[in-house]
Image (tube, rainbow, N blue to C red):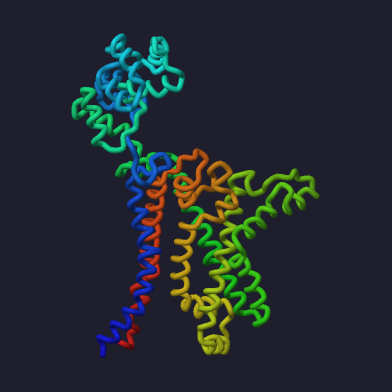
Amino acid sequence: MRHQSDRLGLAFLTPALIFVVLFFLSPVVLTAVFSFTTMSTATGISGGTYRITPSAVRSAAEKGLNPATAERLSQERYTIDDDALTRATKAGIDAEILKELERDLKGKSTDDRRSFERLLKKLDNRPNRRQVKSISPHFRTSILNQSFEDRTTLDATLENLGLDAAERARVAETSYTGWIWTSANFRRMFLQPDTYRILINTIVYVFTTLVIFNTGYAMVLAIVTFYLPGRQATVYRTIWFLPRITPPVIYVLLWKWLAWDTGFISTITGWFGVASRNWMLDTSLNAWVFVVLINGFVGASMGMIIFSSAIKTIPESLFHASAVDGAYRWQQVRHIILPQLRWPILFLTTYQTLSLLSSFELIFLATNGGPGSATEVWSLAAFHLALSNYAGNLQYGLGAAFALILVLIGITASLFYLRLFKFSEMISKPRIEH
C-alpha cells in the first residue's frame, strides 16, 4: 500500500519536475554552456567557415606565420597553367580562347584580376565582357577572400601552396569565422573597468531598494493598515497594490510624464521660476532616485500584501492579552508582530533580492542605464551585451558569462540569508516534541 502511495506521489510530482527542468535548470545549463564560447552576431551559433582575409593573414603573421608565406597568401594572383586550363575546359569556356591562352600566355601571372582581364581583352579571339568575367575565376591561384566549408578542404589547399602543418594550423585558427570554446569571456569581464562600476551600481540598487522599500516600507504599510478600520485598510492596500498590477510600460510612462521637461514636476517648479528639465535624466543622482522609487513602489506593494497576510494569522488573543496588560501598539509590534514575521521576512528578503538582481525591465524602460551608464546594473548589462547594443554586434557568449555570474551571486545571497536568519533553527522541531 505504501509503495502505491509513493508511486502516486511521484506521479503527481512529475509535471512539476518537468517544469523545473525545462524552465529553470535548462536555461541555467545553457547559459553556462554559452558563457564558455565566443558566440556573437559575427560568428553565429551554429558554426562557421574558414575565410582567408587580409586581417586573418595579418593575425596569423603576428602569431608566427612566416612573413614570406603571409605575403604570398595576401597576394591575389592569376596564373595561366595546366590546372587552370583544365578547370576552364571543364567549365565549358570557349575552346579557341583556351587554345590561344595555352599557346601564347601559358606560365603568365598577374597580381590582380584587372591585369588578368586586360590580357584576355588583347587576345585575337577577344572575349566579350561577360566571357571575361566568367573566365577569370578559373585562373585564380591565390586563396585570398576565399571560403572553405571545413578544415580538411582548407588544409588540402594550404598544403598544395607549400605550407607546413604548423603554418596551416595558424592560418586555420585566425581564418575561422565560427565560435570556439574559451574561458576568455570571464577574463575579459573582470579586466573591463566598467565591470566594477556596474557591480557597485548593482549592490547599491539592490540593497537600497530592498531595505528602504521592499521590506522596510512594506512592513510599515502592513502594520499601519493592520491597525486601521477594515474598510479604510482595504482602500489603502488597494491603492498601494496598483503599482504591482499596472502594466510596466504604462507604469513607467506615468513616472516619465512626472519627470519630463514638460511634465508635472517641471510645470509646478516653473511657477516659481525654475527652468524646466528632465528630472529623471539630468543628473546621475536624480536618475538613481527615480530608479529606486520606480522599483521600490512595486516591491513595497507586494511586501505589504505578504506581511499583512502574515500579521492576520497571528491569534487575536495575543493582542487582547497584551492590551489588558497595558502594552502600547509599539510594544505589540516589537514583542508580538515582529517575532512572528521571521518566515515572511526571510522569504521576502530572499525573493526580492533575487528579483532585483535578475529583473531590469523597469530600469530599461525608465533610463536604459543612463544618463551615460550611471544606472547600468548587472542584469541590464547582460541584456545589452547579448541582445541589444548600439554597436550591433551581439555578444552572446560574453552576455551569458555576465548572466552566469548573476546566478552565482543569487545563490550566494540566498545561502547568506538562510544563515543570517538561522534557518536551521527555524525548521527545527519545538522542544516539546523532542
For this orientation, the residue located farthest to the front is 96
Residue found at x 33% / y 79%: 11
For this orientation, the residue located farthest to the left is 165
For this orientation, the residue located farthest to the right is 271
Q: Is residue 255 visible?
A: yes
Q: Percent from the top left, x then y, of residue 48?
A: 34, 40
- Judging depth in this view, the residue of 110 and 28 nearest the camera is 110
Q: How many dots with numbers?
A: 0
Q: Is residue 75 visible?
A: no
Residue found at x 38% / y 40%: 43
Image quadrant assignment for residue 112? top left
52 relative to 18, above or below = above
Q: Percent from the top left, x then y, of residue 178?
A: 34, 40
10 relative to 58, above or below = below
- Judging depth in this view, the residue of 140 and 27 nearest the camera is 140
Image quadrant assignment for residue 136? top left
Task: Please give left or right for residue 255 compared with residue 63 in the image.
Answer: right
Q: Quadrant of the N terminus?
A: bottom left
Q: Quadrant of the C terminus?
A: bottom left
Q: Percent from the top left, x then y, of residue 201?
A: 49, 49
